[in-house]
Image (tube, rainbow, N blue to C red):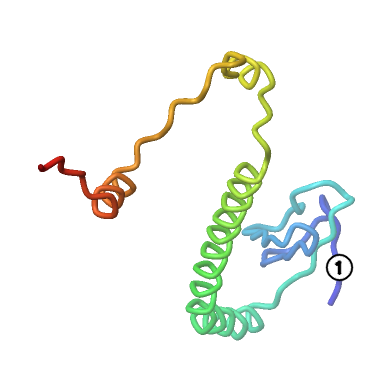
Amino acid sequence: MRTYRGSDKVEPGLYFNARELSFKSVDEEGPLPGSPVEVYRRVPILVLLIVGPLLGLVYAVFLPFIGFAAVAGLLGVKAVHLARGAAREAVRVLRPGWEPSLAFLSRSKPGTPEPEATDEWAKDVRKKLDPPHHDGA
């Protein structure tokens, strides 16, 4: 296949630019669009008529796989976000909550006994084990 450069005078036809992956259609004899740095190749119409439907077939065959790949990619991104959030929360839970000023202000006064917590179960057991003494004479 012969190569043509941008602004070369060519006959009507279809030209392919491999660098940009684009087709340029020239309807009348004249220059190709673009600068002389761009390289074009002429595409014969017979090749275009054969390759076009084949490319459409390849697209139609692989379209379901493209859908599966898109769904798998979406689920993968969601799983990464979920794992990242779980890791962040795990680190936050394991990190010690060091607040020295709060610890100082929450101290009890020296010498003051802590109030005893009432335990209902202990009271019930104590009543059952130590029956009240009756002074009956």
- Which of 67 and 61 lies nearest the eye of the viewer? 67
Q: How many marks?
A: 1
- Which of 106 and 27 lies nearest the eye of the viewer? 106
Q: Considering only vertical position in the picture, is 120 above or below 20?
A: above
Q: Considering only vertical position in the picture, is 133 above or below 21?
A: above
Tell me the residue that label 1 is attached to: 3
**Which quarter shows the C terminus?**
top left
Q: Considering only vertical position in the picture, is 13 above or below 133?
A: below
- Which of 126 and 88 lies nearest the eye of the viewer? 126
Q: Position of residue 111 (x, y in %)?
A: 59, 16
Secondary structure beneath dot 1 equals strand
Q: Position of residue 82 (x, y in %)?
A: 54, 55
Q: Amino acid at mark 1?
A: Thr
Q: What residue sits 20% from the left and 44% below the top?
A: 133
Q: What residue sits 76% from the left and 54% below the top?
A: 32
Q: Quadrant of residue 92?
A: top right
Q: Position of residue 43 (x, y in %)?
A: 71, 73
For disc 1, the neighbor class at 10 Å (few under 14, some 14 to 19, many from 20) is few
**Which quarter shows the N terminus?**
bottom right
Q: What residue sits 69% from the left and 60% below the top?
A: 22
Q: Considering only vertical position in the picture, is 123 above or below 76?
A: above
- Which of 113 and 19 lies nearest the eye of the viewer? 113
Q: Is residue 74 left or right of residue 32?
A: left
Outermost right residue: 37
Q: What residue sits 58% from the left and 85% below the top?
A: 54
Q: Is residue 117 left or right of residue 16?
A: left
Q: Position of residue 120 (x, y in %)?
A: 29, 44
Outermost left residue: 137
